[in-house]
Image (tube, helix red, strand yellow):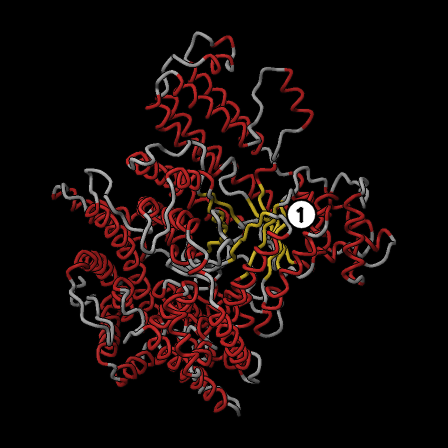
């Protein structure tokens, strides 16, 4: 059995000493899970050998971390070289599973600490007089009090803000969740068991049963194949998103809103809950709708995902209605509700009668969807109307209106207590998730729409859209948008497009099929149509025309996505041209949405240049929208890692946005492992939703001044941005050997073996970094612990400043929240980076290459690691720290737990890559062992770093 000695928490090297007492419970949980895993490992046929190898590698890593003795790390490397392929695989499995279990313990401890804080602030006696700012209650209290660093707002202003603000969280299928769904479910059970073990009233046999339950799950984890043997389909990806809603968010949303209600009622200046149909949080999805570079997402796939989502929603709503029927047996109702019910039931139970009607319509909905239909067929609808048979529910508004009528009736007859229980929860679930659970965005690359219009114009004989300049394109698009006639003959089947001529290629037909599919889906099933790589006004008008051509009754809002540095700089001009068009303003009702891409801009220009240009683009777009009388919403296309716009300090990140760019409306993507981390565990989900809501509320009242950079700050950031961009591109584009080094020193070429997502790793099969998607680009560097994408170019921008600029830099960090947030999140990356580990990849994979310029490649690697250290020291000097994240006790403790297990995985990964690339294996069977070991190390390092792409 694993002892505490075997799996104890190592202290972070060079970190200040801290008392262990606040984290004693975390240590206890890690010990419990580690012991359970140790028992399972040792019970296997080669368990003792695996266990001994794990212990030896962990001890060497721990000793190296403790004293920095390079000989200990070298011994770790030497040990890996002598291991058999099977031992490497089993050892990697042991480390990977431990890291995942340690993450369970950390997640539970984070929830435990939040509850302990809430208990210390108020406990069960009532709300605290002063709660933490990044909670809704804390924000409300701070705004009511005002003064000092906090803005002030009246009770009415606060209440109105809460009733009108919305954060729209879009779950994406970006391939960054390395764990299989079956694995995630087992960890969820372990989380629940740890929660139960914290109960103070547990009896001895109950504790024993819970520990046995954990043992069973750990046993099952060990004997479950953790490797995806085939790529998931888009449908499977969508199922994973729906699983999160069904298992966590469906209950978390009303629970989170009940807490807000209680806090508002208990606040004397407010004293009332939110209205039942207010939805400060909404969700959407790209899973099954994002076809940008993913040929696996077809029109048929999107239809299947919509049907699957609506079936899940119908089942969840039906279950809630059935529970509600058992409660609402009362027979008193308002005249308005009685009048809405069939006369046959006038003497019966009005609420049960109303619920029965809704259940019957949901059953009809399920039958319709099961037959492959998204909406009632016209002939069937007429027939149904002639008979008293129920019609399917198609619009969310119908269901919500019926539920609100019951709520109003209960309140009207004095039964508010019943109204504000399960019924109000269901109203809020329907208001948040609708009849689809996750309304879909559709995303496609701009050139695909141009190709489709090129085929159409060629067919019409009016020229070639692809050959026209922007002015000609725009004029033709506006003319056709004003025409009533269709461009193409109407067909019984979209497959007939290909019969129109050879210009209607498979990609063109796919685009046209997509718009036909959009026309067939009920309006509330779809949200935004996102155009990636949008560059011109015609890119937006093209999508609007293609929707008109397909006969979309309620057109999706069209959202251009500006991604590269040049596109961000050009975004204002594109939108100004659109807003100057009378037809466009009328068509959009004076409202627009623009998406900003954090990933490709950082890949294009580096972190500082991308971030600063994103900030300026937001400022310019908001100012331009105001000039044209347009209400603008911004959609932030962020990922989990710092180089893709991620920031774990959500409250701070939102409050640091440019003034006027949020104003109560915030749309953001959440991807892969971040979805699991933030929303799969109900207490964590409730906390995360609370932070988003608090941040939007607080930001709304923040003055613009402190968030607006001074003239000196702008000048310095302009200079730093240029220096950083030049340095970044000088390496990524300017070094003739960079691509070769990147592919030799990282597992970039092997990442495709993960089968993480349905989308190909590259937009095109050939080419360099520019064709590589942002996720594998980041993923590869994260694996080697160099984390290059988050900081490359930042060192030169921070170093060698003139004395006056150095003083401005310190002032900017102290007084400009956006810059402070940027610096702090890169400092977090520094805490997770390790040059020694990255150097070993060079030693094993680059130095062993059979090519004449190996020395040049190795010199490039050394230069990059030196730049990492330079950047780290510059950040430490700016922050006044001795070690990165010196103030972040929880992160340092977490890294201390994980590093002695991640370091051996990095060493094993480098050794496996070397053997595979040099052919050091005997036959197919051993090669498979090594390939499995590689995938396991990739999973383990991702779990250990809590980041992939």
Q: Is residue 948 left or right of residue 393?
A: left
Looking at this rendering, what residue extends furthest in the front direction?
Answer: 147
Q: Which of the pair 132/934 is nearer the observer?
A: 132
Relative to residue 927, is residue 579 depicted above or below? above
Q: Is residue 542 left or right of residue 850?
A: right
Q: Which of the pair 268/76 is nearer the observer?
A: 268
Q: Residue 822: percent from the left, percent from the top? A: 42, 66
Q: Residue 249: percent from the left, percent from the top? A: 40, 42
Q: Residue at x 43, y 7 (%)?
A: 347
Q: Which of the pair 83/208 is nearer the observer?
A: 208
Q: Residue 858: percent from the left, percent from the top? A: 45, 87
Q: Residue at x 35, y 41 (%)?
A: 256
Relative to residue 745, is residue 779 depicted above or below? above
Callout 1 secondary element: helix
Q: Is residue 904 visible in the rendered structure shown here?
A: no
Q: Is residue 724 visible in the rendered structure shown here?
A: yes
Q: Quadrant of residue 706?
A: bottom left
Relative to residue 314, is residue 859 depicted above or below? below
* Neighbour tally class for label 1: few under 14, some 14-19, many 20 plus, Cα within 10 Å: many
* Label tally: 1
Looking at this rendering, what residue extends furthest in the left direction?
Answer: 204
Q: Residue 241: percent from the left, percent from the top? A: 46, 48
Q: Which of the pair 861/277 is nearer the observer?
A: 277
Q: Which residue is mark 1?
A: 514
Assign the N terminus to one quadrant of the image.
bottom left
Relative to residue 486, is residue 739 depicted above or below? below
């Amino acid at each position: 059995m694993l002892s505490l000695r075997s799996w104890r928490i190592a202290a972070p090297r060079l970190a200040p000493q801290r008392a262990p007492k606040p984290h004693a419970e975390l240590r206890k949980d890690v010990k419990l899970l580690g012991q359970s895993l140790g028992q399972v490992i040792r019970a296997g046929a080669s368990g003792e050998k695996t266990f001994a190898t794990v212990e030896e590698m962990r001890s060497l890593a721990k000793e190296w971390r403790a004293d920095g003795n390079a000989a200990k790390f070298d011994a770790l490397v030497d040990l890996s070289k002598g291991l058999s392929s099977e031992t490497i695989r089993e050892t990697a499995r042991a480390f990977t599973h431990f890291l995942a279990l340690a993450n369970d313990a950390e997640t539970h401890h984070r929830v435990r600490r939040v509850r302990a804080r809430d208990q210390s602030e108020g406990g069960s006696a009532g709300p605290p007089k002063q709660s933490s700012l990044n909670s809704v209650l804390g924000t409300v209290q701070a705004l009511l009090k005002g003064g000092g660093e906090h803005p002030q707002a009246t009770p009415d202003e606060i209440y109105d803000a809460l009733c009108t603000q919305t954060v729209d969280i879009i779950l994406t299928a970006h391939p960054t969740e390395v764990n299989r769904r079956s694995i995630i479910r087992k960890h969820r059970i372990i989380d629940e068991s740890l929660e139960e073990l914290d109960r103070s009233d547990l009896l001895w046999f109950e504790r024993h049963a819970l520990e046995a339950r954990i043992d069973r799950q750990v046993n099952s984890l060990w004997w479950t194949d953790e490797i995806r043997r085939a790529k998931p389909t888009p449908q499977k990806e969508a199922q994973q998103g729906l699983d999160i809603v069904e298992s966590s968010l469906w209950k978390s949303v009303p629970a989170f809103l009940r807490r807000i209600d209680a806090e508002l009622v208990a606040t004397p200046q407010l004293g009332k809950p939110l209205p039942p149909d207010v939805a400060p949080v909404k969700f959407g999805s790209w899973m099954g709708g994002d076809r940008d570079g993913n040929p696996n997402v077809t029109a048929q796939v999107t239809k299947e995902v919509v049907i699957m989502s609506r079936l899940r929603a119908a089942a969840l709503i039906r279950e809630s209605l059935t529970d509600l029927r058992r409660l609402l047996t009362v027979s008193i109702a308002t005249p308005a509700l009685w009048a809405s019910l069939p006369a046959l039931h006038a003497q019966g139970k009005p609420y049960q009668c109303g619920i029965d009607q809704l259940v019957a319509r949901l059953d009809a909905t399920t039958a319709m969807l099961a037959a492959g239909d998204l909406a009632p067929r016209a002939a069937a609808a007429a027939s149904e109307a002639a008979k008293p048979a129920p019609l399917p529910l198609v619009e969310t508004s119908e269901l919500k209106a019926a539920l609100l009528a019951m709520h109003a009736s209960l309140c009207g007859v004095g039964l508010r207590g019943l109204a504000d229980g399960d019924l109000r929860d269901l109203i809020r679930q329907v208001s948040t998730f609708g009849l689809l659970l996750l309304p879909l965005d559709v995303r496609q690359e701009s050139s695909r729409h141009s190709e489709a219009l090129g085929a159409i114009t060629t067919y019409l004989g009016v020229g070639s859209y692809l050959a026209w300049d922007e002015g000609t394109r725009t004029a033709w698009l506006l003319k056709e948008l004003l025409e009533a006639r269709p461009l193409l003959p109407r067909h019984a089947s979209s497959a007939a497009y290909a019969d129109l001529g050879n210009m209607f290629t498979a990609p063109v037909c796919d685009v046209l099929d997509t718009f036909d599919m959009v026309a067939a889906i009920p309006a509330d099933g779809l949200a935004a149509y996102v155009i990636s790589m949008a560059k011109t006004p015609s890119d937006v008008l093209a999508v609007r025309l293609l929707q008109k051509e397909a006969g979309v009754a309620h057109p999706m809002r069209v959202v251009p996505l500006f991604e590269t540095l040049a596109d961000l700089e050009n975004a204002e001009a594109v939108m100004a041209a659109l807003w100057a068009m009378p037809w466009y303003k009328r068509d959009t009702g004076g409202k627009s949405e623009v998406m900003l891409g954090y990933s490709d801009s950082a890949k294009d220009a580096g972190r500082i240049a991308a971030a600063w240009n994103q900030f300026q683009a937001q400022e310019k777009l908001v100012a331009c929208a105001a000039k044209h009388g347009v209400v603008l919403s911004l959609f932030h296309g962020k990922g989990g890692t710092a180089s893709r716009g991620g920031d774990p300090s959500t409250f701070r990140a939102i409050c640091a946005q440019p003034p006027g760019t949020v104003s109560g409306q915030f749309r953001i993507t959440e991807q892969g492992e971040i979805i699991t981390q933030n929303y799969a565990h109900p207490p964590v989900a409730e906390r995360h939703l609370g932070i988003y809501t608090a941040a939007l509320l607080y930001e709304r009242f923040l003055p613009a001044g402190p968030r607006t950079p001074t003239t000196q700050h702008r000048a310095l950031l302009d200079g730093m941005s240029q220096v950083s961009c030049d340095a970044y591109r000088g390496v990524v584009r300017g070094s003739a050997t960079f691509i070769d080094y990147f592919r030799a020193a990282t597992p970039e070429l092997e990442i495709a073996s993960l089968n993480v997502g349905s989308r190909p790793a590259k937009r095109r099969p050939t080419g360099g970094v520019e064709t590589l998607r942002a996720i594998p680009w980041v993923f590869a560097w994260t694996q080697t612990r160099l984390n290059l994408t988050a900081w490359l170019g930042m060192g030169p921008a921070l170093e060698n400043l003139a004395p006056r600029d150095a003083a401005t830099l310190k002032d900017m960090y102290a007084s400009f929240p956006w810059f402070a947030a940027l610096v702090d999140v890169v400092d977090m990356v520094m805490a997770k980076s390790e040059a020694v580990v990255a150097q070993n990849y060079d030693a094993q994979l680059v130095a062993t290459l059979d090519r004449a310029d190996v020395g040049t490649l190795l010199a490039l690697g050394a230069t990059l690691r030196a730049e990492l250290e330079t950047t780290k020291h510059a950040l430490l000097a700016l922050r006044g720290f001795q070690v990165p994240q010196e103030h972040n006790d929880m992160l340092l403790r977490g890294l201390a737990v994980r590093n002695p297990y991640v370091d051996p995985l990095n060493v094993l990964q480098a050794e496996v890559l070397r053997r595979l690339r040099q052919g050091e294996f005997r036959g197919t069977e051993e090669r498979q062992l090594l390939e499995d070991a590689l995938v396991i190390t990739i999973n383990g390092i991702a779990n250990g770093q809590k980041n992939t792409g």
